[in-house]
């Protein structure tokens, strides 16, 4: 039987993997804060998770309090896709550094998170906002974006080790 060589990981595959990892950690951390703050502020963990589904289902998703496959799953998918999108910028910043340190990972995460918040909440048309800003107050929103930054930074710190 001929010996097979182990598959070589291409630079593109490595970059895509890093973006997916960073985006997933950021998505999970911020979604956890969304559910927690939704429970505190709306007595519904699902309410802010449903909100991003307004991209597809309109205002109905913004007012939905209970969990559902249609609204909650779609909202989580939109949230995750957005997180992966912003993680691409984070990973680009990280790739520009000679050495990734915890401080660099955190500062890059803060820069990208601030950009994401400004774009999400001030730049895009109302139809493309995350939607959860209509279900949470300022404290909740700050927590969601802080959770997002922590998820991105965690990916950088784990990779630096």
Image (spheres, rainbow, N blue to C red):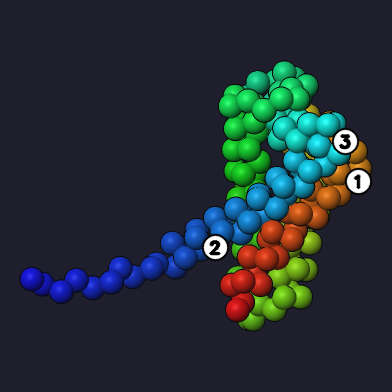
Under circle 2, the secondary element is helix
- Whole-Å distance between the Cαs marked 1 and 3? 10 Å
x 71%, y 70%: residue = 105
Reply above or below: 50 against 90.
above
- In the rendered image, which quarter is residue 23 located in? bottom right
Where's residue 121, x and y in %? Answer: 82, 40
In this rendering, is residue 60 above or below 133? above
List the residue tagged with mark 1: 139
Q: Residue at x 75, y 25 (%)?
A: 65
User: Of helix, strand and loop, which one carries label 3?
Assistant: helix
Q: Which residue is pictured at 8% across the width and 71% down the height?
A: 1
Q: Give the alpha-carbon distance from disc 2 to disc 1, as whole Å.
A: 30 Å
Q: Position of residue 107 (x, y in %)?
A: 78, 68
**In the rendered structure, which disc, 1 or 3, sits on the residue that comes first in sequence?**
3
Is residue 36 rendered to the left or right of residue 53?
Answer: right
Tell me if residue 123 can be seen: no
- Residue 18's disc number: 2
Label 1 close to label 3 by CB (< 8 Å): no
Residue 63 percent across, percent down from the top left: 78, 21
């Amino acid at each position: 039987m001929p010996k097979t060589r182990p598959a070589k990981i291409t630079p593109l595959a490595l970059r895509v993997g890093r973006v997916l990892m960073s985006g997933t950690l950021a998505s999970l951390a911020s979604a956890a804060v969304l559910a927690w703050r939704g429970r505190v502020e709306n007595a519904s963990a699902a309410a802010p998770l449903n909100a991003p589904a307004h991209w597809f289902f309109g205002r109905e998703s913004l007012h939905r309090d209970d969990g559902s496959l249609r609204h909650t799953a779609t909202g989580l998918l939109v949230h995750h896709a957005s997180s992966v999108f912003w993680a691409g910028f984070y990973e680009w910043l990280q790739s520009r550094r000679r050495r990734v340190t915890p401080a660099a990972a955190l500062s890059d995460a803060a820069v990208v998170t601030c950009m994401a918040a400004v774009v999400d909440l001030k730049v895009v048309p109302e139809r493309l906002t995350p939607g959860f800003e209509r279900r949470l107050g300022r404290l909740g929103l700050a927590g969601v974006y802080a959770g997002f930054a922590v998820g991105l930074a965690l990916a950088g710190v784990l990779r630096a080790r």
